[in-house]
Image (cartoon, grey):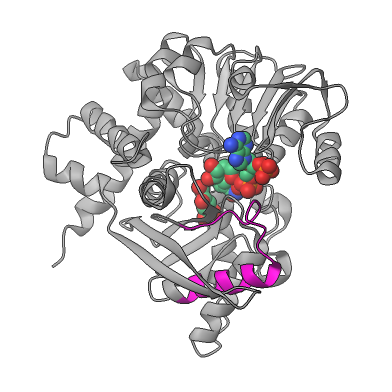
Amino acid sequence: MVKNDPFANATKQVNDACDVLGIKDKGIREYLAMPNRILRVKIPVTMDNGKIRVFTGFRSQHNNDRGPYKGGIRYFNPEGGVEYMEREVMALSSWMTWKCAIVDVPLGGGKGGIYVNPKTEKLSENELERLTRGFAYKISEVIGPEKDIPAPDVYTTGKEMTQIMDTFSKLNGNKYSPGVITGKPISMGGSLARNVATGLGAAYTVREAAKAIKLNLKGAKVVLQGFGNASTFAGEYLEKMGAKVIAVSDSKGSISIPKGAKVSKIIEHKQKKGSVVGFPGSKKISTEELLTTKCDVLVPGALENQITAKIANKLQCKIIAEAANGPTLPEADPIIYKKKILVIPDILANSGGVCISYLEWVQNNMGYYWTFDEVANKMEKNITKGFKDAYALSKKHKIDMRKATMVLAVERVLEAFDQKGIWP
Ligand SMILES: NC(=O)C1=CN([C@@H]2O[C@H](COP(=O)(O)OP(=O)(O)OC[C@H]3O[C@@H](n4cnc5c(N)ncnc54)[C@H](OP(=O)(O)O)[C@@H]3O)[C@@H](O)[C@H]2O)C=CC1
Ligand SMILES: O=C(O)CCC(=O)C(=O)O
């Protein structure tokens, strides 16, 4: 048993959706909740000092009823250890299934990762490359452009995506296979807008949520948890919509900036000093203080299990845009709903990433590439529709946005499952 088990949380969300849909059949519930396959691999790496170190990696393939498995690869060492990470990737792969369904991209759910923190463990570039290629080799049997298409996630970038693509291509007779992975650099067959996609998509969903609750985003105050790919671009695009960032955090700590600051200036500071902490005009605060800062939009954009019941009781925001996966514990959801805070659940708020990953894969498959605006506009349509559909359902059934989003997603997966049935 792991503490704050993310897979138990993901399963609860599936069951909640089944309750709303009147699905009582235990077999169907189990089919929807459980991953199809979990691969756990040993990755031996020769470190720079000549010693062998063995790493553990995972790929969880949750559901492919609507299309090939799809989802990121993270390099992280969560507090609960390797066993926690296994449950984490299972949950993350489940959320990918529902995410692809709610924004209607024809893909399923997968997720993977390696239990390692490349930042704190200070792996050299060569060690990291050997680890990445070793992992790619170990999962090469289960991935492929028509099978399972990974992407970046926490502490992985276009560089690792390139190394995975290259290893896969070499293992397959040097067949150029850009469609095996997304989030690649542009020069390696990546898509314009993928780099900003998760944050841009989150900003689009906040714009829709603000319209729904009649909140003017001009001058709206934003708090960002995490200062990586998802959260910085969410902050920058919300800034373009007129909002102002007043508190941020990273793995080294949280700060409040009462007068607000441009995200680009905080990025500059972090690039120089290695953290947001110490940004001029800021004050160091605790994680709890960050999350409960009085603001209009809270963007948890780092890790899961951040908003507990205790935090939920103290929240002072109007909208929560879950740029991270699984940042809110199930115990917090009813409290937040009662407080009339509008939650844009993770599977919707951060779906811009997979939307544009899908478009990257489509471009790779056809060998023809779209402009930034073409790609971003397609994503905007899908994500806006996803928000509107879920919001309308939440109002109709008087349920929170997480349940509404999950109900729509589960319905779509079941529709495909009903067509296919079980084989053999
Ligand atoms: N990248 C993508 O396309 C997508 C990402 N997501 C989700 O977004 C979330 C963030 O991923 P992404 O932005 O890609 O990852 P990044 O690696 O780019 O950034 C992760 C950020 O989280 C911070 N962080 C790590 N630990 C903590 C902590 N204990 N408290 C506060 N901040 C912390 C890191 O701090 P530091 O800078 O100090 O290392 C970093 O700023 C994840 O939940 C991921 O699954 C969802 C959809 C797509
Ligand atoms: O871009 C993708 O394929 C998936 C990104 C991801 O891992 C996520 O949405 O959580």
Classify the position of the C terminus by image quarter.
Answer: bottom left
Residue 92 location in percent, x, y?
Answer: 42, 47
Q: Judge from the rendering whether residue 381 lies leftward or rightward of residue 238; answer left or right.
A: left
Vertical arrangement, residue 326 with respect to residue 123, above or below = above
The structure residue drawn at horizontal position 27% and vertical position 58%, both measured from the top left corner, is: 36
The one of 251 and 214 positioned closer to us in this rendering? 251
Residue 65 location in percent, x, y?
Answer: 30, 56
User: Is residue 196 at least partly visible in the picture?
Assistant: yes
Classify the position of the N terminus by image quarter.
Answer: top left
Residue 207 location in percent, x, y?
Answer: 63, 27
The structure residue drawn at horizontal position 56% and vertical position 70%, both measured from the top left corner, is: 131
Classify the position of ligand 1 by quadrant: top left, top right, bottom left or bottom right.
Answer: top right
| Residue 119 magenta | yes
User: Residue 169's image quarter?
Assistant: bottom right
- The span picked out in magenta is 113-137
Q: Judge from the rendering whether residue 302 lies leftward or rightward of residue 391; answer left or right.
A: right
The one of 103 and 90 positioned closer to us in this rendering? 90
Vertical arrangement, residue 408 with respect to residue 220, above or below = below
Residue 10 location in percent, x, y?
Answer: 34, 38
| Residue 285 magenta | no
Q: Judge from the rendering whether residue 224 lies leftward or rightward of residue 68; answer left or right.
A: right
The structure residue drawn at horizontal position 37% and vertical position 57%, both measured from the top left corner, is: 60
User: Is residue 379 at least partly visible in the picture?
Assistant: no
Vertical arrangement, residue 367 with respect to residue 73, above or below = below
The mark tally for this picture is 0
Residue at the outermost bottom position:
173
